[in-house]
Amino acid sequence: MRGILLDMVWPAIYVSQTLWKFWFLVVGTIIIETFVIKYFLKFNWKKSIIASLIGNCVSGFVGTFIMAWAMLFWHLVVDNFVHGTFGIINWIATYILMCLGSVFLETLTIKLIYKEKIKRLFLPMLTGNFLSYAFIAYAMFSATSIDPDEKREETLKFLPNKQQFLLLDNSKMHIDTATIRVSFGRDNRRLNDIKSLGYDLNIPFTKQNRNSFQFDFRILGEQSSGGIDDSFKELHLINLKDEYKILLEQKNPDTDLGWTKPIITDTLIFKRLDK
């Protein structure tokens, strides 16, 4: 297995970063869950506050970190079947699974302290965590869909050093000019960097065998690249550069190996056209 670099990202990383940004959510969740625990479990006020405080500290600070990395294993499997690491299906799954994972850790913690049944604790814990993740989802998508700081958007073009390929299944494939969209704020600074949004390199291509998924693109040095569409590949990047090295990987003809040991047939260099 190839090494995972520190600049590798997936949706859960952004969710956890947003939670840290809105740290006051934990305080709000503690208050809400205190009332919910008292109502459902009939604890006294002191016991309710302690249960909510300890549970949220575990789920908010420890659980979020654990679940962010646990989602990486989700992407290693599911991204082969859905459109892109940052596709809508993966975003929805990220929120649901991270929320449920946090609820489980919080519930388990309270169970160990007060010897309550998980079935009795689950609903109160779920209520507070659901409200927190719902707010995170709202904050993230409202910021990306309507950004009051955005003044203009620019599309950068990147041309690969090679565009025509003969794949291992003897079918032809053509790579078109790749693009990256960059948002600029009113001070003319790139919002992708300021808001830690990163960049998406969109690589369009046409292939002779439209229904075949015998190849994929991957950033040189990274382990996973997410799913691939039938006409384009989207690679998420941390930094904006003038040049990117992208590997063209093809499925191993040996059916016993397949995608477990793909064959790297080319290293493409995408250079920015206006540089």
Image (cartoon, rainbow, N blue to C red):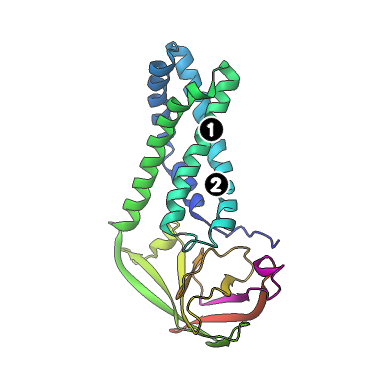
Q: At x 41% / y 56%, what residue is drawn?
A: 88
Q: Is residue 71 left or right of residue 24?
A: right
Q: At x 55% / y 37%, what residue is drawn?
A: 63
The x and y percentages for residue 9 are 54, 57
Do the residues bearing badges 1 and 2 touch, measured as CB atoms within 8 Å?
A: no
10 Å crowding of disc 1: few (<14), some (14-19), many (20+): some
Asked whether 233 falls inside the magenta stretch, the response is no
Quarter occupied by residue 264: bottom right
Q: Is residue 227 above or below residue 38?
A: below
Q: At x 48% / y 14%, what residue is drawn?
A: 47
Q: Is residue 269 left or right of residue 14?
A: right
Q: Is residue 146 above or below residue 101?
A: below
Q: Look at the numbered disc 2 and give the secondary structure of its residue.
A: helix
The answer to whether residue 195 is seen in the rendering is: no
Q: Which mark is drawn over residue 72?
A: none
The x and y percentages for residue 96 are 45, 43
Q: Which mark is drawn over residue 68?
A: 2
Q: Is residue 104 left or right of residue 180?
A: right
Mark 1 vs mark 2, foreground winner is: 1
The answer to whether residue 41 is seen in the rendering is: yes
Which three-letter amino acid code belongs to the residue tagged 1?
Phe
| Quadrant for the N terminus in the image | bottom right
Observer-nearest of 173 and 1: 173
Q: Is residue 243 above or below residue 107?
A: below
The magenta region covers: 242-260
Q: Residue furthest top?
A: 44
Instruction: Quote the CA–CA distance across marks 1 and 2.
Output: 15 Å
The x and y percentages for residue 148 are 27, 56
